[in-house]
Amino acid sequence: MQLNTTIDIELDHTDKKIINSLQKNARLTNVELAEQINLSPSACLRRTKALIDADVFGEFVGLLNRDLFHVQGTAFIFISLDHQSEAVFEQFEIAVAQLEQVMECYLMAGDNDYMLKVIYTDAKDYEELYYKKLLRLPGVVGTQTRMALRQVHSNTRIKVT
C-alpha cells in the first residue's frame, strides 16, 4: 500500500524511519530509537515530539497477553438493524461503544449493517454477551456469528515509505 505522506508536516526519510520503528516497538527509549536510526538523542526527541504533536500517531497502547486474562475466543458478529437511518445508526453506535467485549465495530456495505469483533472468556461469557447485551442493542433484528478457531496473523502497522 502506498501511503500518502503529504500531511500537515512534510515527512522526510528520517521521520519515516522514526514512524516505522515506533510502530514495531513503541517502548523504545529515545536513546534506543536515536541509535537505531542514526540520529542524536536530542534531534530524535525533537522529531518524535513533532510527529506526536502533528497527530501522526493515533495513540500508544500496550497490547495485553490474552492468555493471562483468560480470553478464550474471538467472534465476528454481523448485525442487521430494523431500518437504516442516521438516527438508528447513531443510537446503535453509541450503545455498542459501551460494551467492553466489543473490540472493533464496522459499518458495512452489503447484506449486514455492522460487523463486530468481540472477545469472550468461555461459552457462558459469550452467551451472556450475546443474549443480554447484543440482542438488546437499539434496532437489532438479526445477527450472524462466526467463531474464530485461532488467529493466524495480526498486524497493527502501516508501512510508511
Image (tube, rainbow, N blue to C red):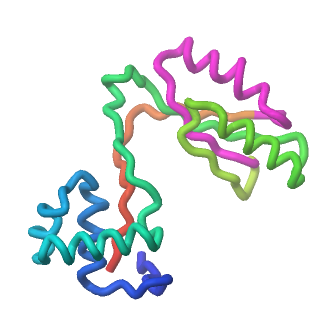
Name the residue: 64% across, 51% down: 106
Q: Quadrant of residue 77?
A: top right
Above or below: residue 44 compared with residue 67 = below
Name the residue: 9% across, 69% down: 35
Q: Quadrant of residue 99?
A: top right
Q: Quadrant of residue 31?
A: bottom left
Indicate left or right for 92 with 97 as reference: right
Q: Nearer the viewer, residue 107 or 28?
A: 28
Name the residue: 34% across, 43% down: 62
Where residue 110 sits in the image (x, y, percent)?
A: 74, 56
Name the residue: 49% across, 83% down: 8
Indicate left or right for 12 with 99 as reference: left
Where residue 98 sits in the image (x, y, percent)?
A: 66, 34
Where residue 29 sits in the image (x, y, percent)?
A: 18, 57
Where residue 40 sits in the image (x, y, percent)?
A: 12, 76
**Residues rendered magenta in the picture:** 113-142
Above or below: residue 20 compared with residue 60 = below
Q: Nearer the viewer, residue 6 or 150?
A: 6
Report if residue 92 lies within the magenta region: no
Q: Quadrant of the N terminus?
A: bottom left
